[in-house]
Amino acid sequence: MQITNEPISYLIDNTTVIFGILMAILGFVFYTSSVGNRWIKGFYNVIPPLLLCYFLPGLLNSFHVIDGVNSPLPAIGSRYFLPACLILFVINLDIKEMWALRKRAGLMFFTGMIGIVLGGPLAVYLTSLMAPEVVGGSGPDAVWRGLGSLAGSWIGGSANQVALKEILEPSATLFSSIIAVDVFVAYIWMAFLLYGASKYKSFDRFFNADGEDVERLKEKMDEKVKVNSKIPETKDLMLMIAIAFGGTGLATLLADPVANYMTTNYPETARFSLTNSFFWIVFFATAIGVSLSFTPLRKLEFAGASKVGTVLLYVLITTIGMQMDILAILENPGLFMVGILWISFHALLLLIVGKIFKVPFFYYAVGSMSNVGGVASASVTSAAFHPSLISVGVIMSVFSYAIGTYAGWLTAILMQVASGQ
């Protein structure tokens, strides 16, 4: 067989047209996912909208309709939209409210986070004993790099996942497989928690838990939402955009000198990504968001700051998805077992702590999903118990956004050690 190195021809190569197609995909997914048709609702119960936002652009790249790898759009998304949406998510962080929830909600949140931080390296180590090729690889194909980005998703959300993708630099092929593991494992776990929400009294009996404080929390959160929610005005939206992208500019301005300094004076820290300018962009963007959460700007959340952040996040997700090779999912199916072992340790640790401290199942479920699923999944899980409890899921998830990149990075380093690299 004669092998040729002819360049691949793509059907569409105009960047503006490609961006228009990506936005049309977002519009299509969000419109259809809100349609009341039972067949369509059934489809989205199995295939979540987030997955389609990754995979539909990936299909265009895989079948050479567009050139996602060499497009400038992914770099624009990661450098502009990612820090901006992190700032808008974290600006809602309410330390006082988090402290008020520290006894039970906080206990389960941090238990869930520890379960992810320790569960990842444990799953990698156990897999390396049975099937070392599953967690092997080198360079950009080193599996710990891809699993590190998954840790960002499971201790924060998609924004943290993309941040760690840029920091750890797994190959597009590996990242494609990781996205499939993320969606498959996380949504199966979420389905169990939603089922548990419908049977929460039985779970509370198992934990010997008293749910009276959950009832009081329902009333408190319901009143808070009624008093503070507002319809956003143009000035509110412009202020959100100014803070998001102004903060992104400031974070970038600060990040480059720090990365250059680390590269020049401490080159050995490259192993920990400390010479990577994007690591510092995310660090400073998150710090800016946390700092602003102590100011009156935190009230922008009541006008929809996190919703604007979500819009930016989904635009970012489509630009990441356009780099994916869908067929890569079949190259390492053993990664699904790593994900299952990982989430099982997380669930078991929550179960043990919940049983010991007699914690209501509500805190178990939301403590888990505010880590594993981020704001959207934690909100859905909270709403399954009562709509007024959505705020609890949001508060805990915002905190996970604030620490997700750092904790995910630590998990990645531990998985690197566990894999023997």
Image: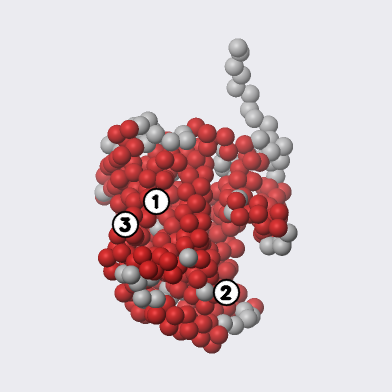
Quadrant showing the N terminus: top right
Whether residue 325 can be seen here: yes
Q: In this view, does 336 lie to the left or right of 413?
A: right
Quarter holding residue 239: bottom right
Residue type (three-letter) at the residue carrying disc 1: Ile
Q: Is residue 392 left or right of residue 207?
A: right
Give the residue number, with chain letter if any, for mark 3: 349
Q: Identify whether 167 is placed above or below 198.
A: above
Q: Which of marks 1 and 2 is nearer the N terminus?
A: 2
Residue occupying the point 34% across, 51% down: 345
Give the residue number, with chain letter if any, for mark 2: 304
Real-space Cα separation, disc 3 to disc 2, in angstroms: 35 Å
Q: Helix, strand, or loop for circle 2?
A: loop
Decide: marks 3, 1 in contact (CB < 8 A)?
no
Give the percent coordinates (x, y) of residue 237.
60, 74
Q: How crowded is mark 3: few (under 14 residues within 10 Å), some or many (20 or more)?
A: some
Give the residue number, with chain letter if any, for mark 1: 343
Q: Residue 115 carries which label?
A: none
Give the percent coordinates (x, y) of residue 25.
68, 52
Q: Identify whether 341 is placed above or below 316.
A: above
Give the percent coordinates (x, y) of residue 42.
65, 54
Residue type (three-letter) at the residue carrying disc 2: Gly
